[in-house]
Amino acid sequence: AAPLPLVLNTWAFRGAAETAWRTLQSGGSELDAVETGCGQCEIEQCDGSVGFGGSPDEHGETTLDAMIMDGNTMEVGSVADLRHVKNAIGVARKVMQHTKHTLLVGESASLFAVSMGFPYEDLTTQNSLSIYLKWLNQSCQPNYWKNVIPDPSKSCGPYKRAKELNNRKEWSISQRKMNIHNHDTIGMIVIGETGNVAAGTSTNGATHKIQGRVGDSPIAGAGAYADSTVGGAAATGDGDIMMRFLPSYQAVEYMRMGIDPTIACQKVISRIQKYASEFFGAVICANTTGSYGAACNKIPGFRQFHFMVYSPLLSQPSEQV
Ligand code: SD4
């Protein structure tokens, strides 16, 4: 257990933890801390998988998913498939504050963002362009299709690859390639001194995803969850699988039953394992007494999961495995 306040976030995203902590220290709310903390990762383009310029989809475009949740009111704001706007968690916060909706998507979410004063800009960078061109020119490996009837008139993308695989009579297994290298999300839980809980996420999703794909991160209970009567949780990993299990909601519900945070995370992971033994993913959670924990699915190539903790006992964010 750690004395409050507590900042917990996925991966070794130090700048995010520091920013959230500074926000609390300067009198900001738990929601402010989540917004600025995750927002810092959007600015730093943490690991290329948060913010602009990363994870281009099959058409080369970077799109963003983010959410924020207030554990006092159980209000949520989120955006999915957000285009041309960099500060996804900022827009999510505006959805929560200025609308009666929970989730806005796609170009319509971008128009909402513009109406709230966010700049409309290109999210493509030299980096995302080169990831996209390399994929287009060299492999066109369809990461996220399965059982597709190949269309010979299409010369690239899933169709070309499906045709090749069909010729080899191997085309029934989805060619998923989600792994630790192309796939990190910031998920953050902030518990204030008086036990107010806020949580949020921000990501650019899965690389070479099919256009329109939305992952777990902007879905309440999947990407993150907060309830000030219990605690908060956040998830990272293969959102296509994880969102089917509402892992963050489940972790909070386990904690509500009095289960220790580490065990709560382990139970969440093992439930998913029963159906998808090879899935890539991790969950963090914390309760309002300041106890926290994490668990990941130990698959080859991904045995350690790093997360950041910042609490009054620490002079700087501490990276834990
Ligand atoms: C997604 N869950 O879009 C996100 C990505 C992620 O570690 O968390 N990667 O599926």
Image (cartoon, grey):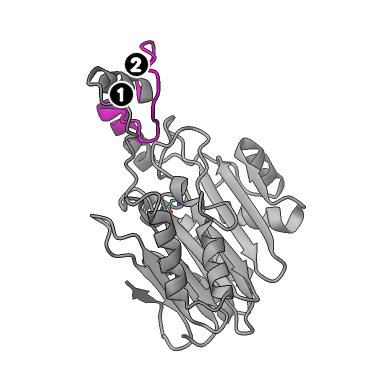
Q: Is residue 203 above or below residue 129?
A: below
| Residue 18 visible in the picture | no
The disc at residue 115 is none
The x, y position of residue 159, in whole percent, is 36, 20
Question: For the residue marked with disc 2, what is the amino acid?
Answer: Ser
- Crowding near pointer 2: few (<14 within 10 Å), some, many (20+)? few
For label 1, being within 8 Å of ligand 1 is answered: no
- Residue nearest the viewer, comparing 187 with 49: 187
Residue holding disc 2: 155
What segment carries the magenta color? 132-157
- Residue nearest the viewer, comparing 84 with 67: 67
- Classify residue 94 by image quadrant: bottom right
Q: Is residue 65 above or below residue 296?
A: above
- Marks 2 and 1 close (CB-CB < 8 Å): no
- Crowding near pointer 1: few (<14 within 10 Å), some, many (20+)? some
Residue holding disc 1: 161
Question: For the residue marked with disc 1, what is the amino acid?
Answer: Arg
| Residue 288 visible in the picture | yes
Residue at left offset 45%, top offset 63%? 268
What is the C-alpha distance between the residues marked 2 and 1? Answer: 9 Å
- Whether residue 316 appears in magenta in the rendering, the answer is no
Q: Is residue 309 above or below residue 144?
A: below
Residue at left offset 70%, top offset 50%? 116
The x, y position of residue 320, in whole percent, is 34, 74
Label 2 or label 1, whichever comes before in sequence order: 2
Most extreme residue toward the front is 274
Rendered-image quadrant of the C terminus: bottom left
Mark in the foreground, 2 or 1: 1
